[in-house]
Image (cartoon, helix red, strand yellow):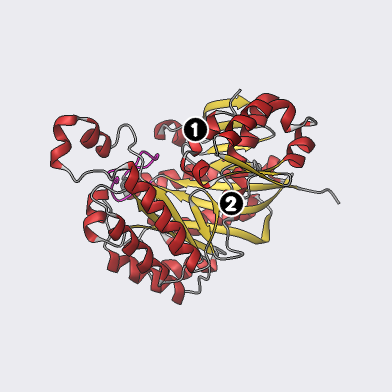
Amino acid sequence: MTTRSELELYIHIPFCVQKCNYCDFLSFSAQSEEMQEYVQALLKQIEYQKLEAKEYMVTTVFIGGGTPSLLSNKQMKDVFAKLHEVFHIMREAEITIEVNPGTVNEEKLHNYKALGINRLSIGLQSTHEVELKTLGRIHTYSEFAKTYAQAREAGFDNINIDLMSAIPGQSVASWQTNLKKVLKLEPEHISVYSLIIEEGTPFARWYQEEHLHSEYPPIPSEEVMLQMDDVTEKELKKQEYVRYEISNYAKKGYECRHNLGYWNRKEYLGLGLGAASYIENERFKNTSNMAKYIENPEALEERQKLTRQEQMEEFCFLGLRKIEGIAEKDFQEQFQISIQDVYAKELNELQEEGLLERKGSKISLTKRGLELGNYVFVKFVL
């Protein structure tokens, strides 16, 4: 019997009710006709994978966006039917869908369960109405609470809640309230992202043009952000959540397998508009142009075969996102050379700066290294 290679699938659904003020993801609002046209193109792209799919066994599926929960029950059912027709999806595969409060109901949640979806990621961001309004979210906290209760009633026992810190106008006290409110719900997983002002977003216009600063709530200072990080770690640790990646905390056994696959450089295939893939040391990205995608779902806008050096760089800066870090023996096995022979200078400098530490054969970020992760990662780009 031929052994199949493991593969992760990412399905991109780019539609949202409205664009949030901080968001630079590939997402936009659309009419039902355009959404249906997109689903048909997505089904074609999945169908086109039929030959290559025979070589793989799918271990995780992640449906992201945008807001995937905007699709109708029939559209989602069609997508899953085609996925199962084309791919061999393991019975115990982790299958996640991102949902936003206000876009799901009991019927949809039961439908997800029937389709084999076993993990929900709910985009809350904040428990405070004023912060939700600042972010441009379409939901209230009470709508989130209703969605969460309905998800539990539908039988979901693996739920992630997304939270955002460093929101304009946010204080350490209001952030701590966010955490405590969410912890009372006892989700299995919590993702905590610090706000980044991205180019082309309303936030970029509001906070990068000096004459507008006074009109909007101030962004928390770096000192306040660090205090928020400390509060996050302390509050979640008290409730037995383990920080396993820079932005992610989980109860034991509930780490997101799909995201860990990214940091461990497992192969994954991206399906849908602008979705990225990593197969056989090649990275490629689907077109981000909707008209082109509808016309030809296999159209690409980027393709890059990684050199051995680039693979080593990725091994380090992706692997170091994990709290456990990277293992010297894994580097040796993958590249037939010691990590010391390649990165001795960088490793020594980062250790001296107190940003990296060694525990046996493992190399990981220190607490300060976690705060300055991007500075550390750049050091491994030779």
Local packing at callout 1 (Cα closer than 10 Å; few below 14, some 14-19, many 20+) is few
Instruction: Give the x, y percent position of residue 362.
Output: 69, 45
The rendered magenta stretch, by its main secondary structure, is classed as loop
Q: Residue furthest right?
A: 1
Do we see residue 65 in this rendering? yes
Residue 127 sits in which quadrant?
Answer: bottom left
Q: Residue furthest front?
A: 352
Instruction: Give the x, y percent position of residue 377.
Output: 54, 33
Q: Which residues are magenta?
A: 15-28
Q: Nearer the viewer, residue 100 or 355?
A: 355
Q: Nearer the viewer, residue 315 or 117?
A: 315
Element carrying mark 2: helix
Q: Residue at x 34, y 45 (%)?
A: 223
Q: Nearer the viewer, residue 301 or 215?
A: 215
Q: Amino acid under label 1? A: Tyr
Q: Nearer the viewer, mark 2 or mark 1?
A: 1
Q: Residue at x 15, y 34 (%)?
A: 212
Instruction: Give the x, y percent position of residue 250.
Output: 53, 61
Quote the CA–CA distance across marks 2 and 1.
25 Å
Disc assigned to residue 258:
2
The relative height of residue 242 versus residue 366 in the rendered view (above or below) is: below
Element carrying mark 1: helix
Q: Amino acid under label 2? A: His
The relative height of residue 63 versus residue 254 in the rendered view (above or below) is: above
Q: Residue at x 62, y 55 (%)?
A: 84
Indicate whether residue 19 is drawn in magenta: yes
The C terminus sits in image quarter: top right
Q: Is residue 116 left or right of residue 223?
A: right
Disc assigned to residue 375:
1
Determine contact: label 2, label 1, CB under 8 Å: no
Q: Residue at x 73, y 47 (%)?
A: 360
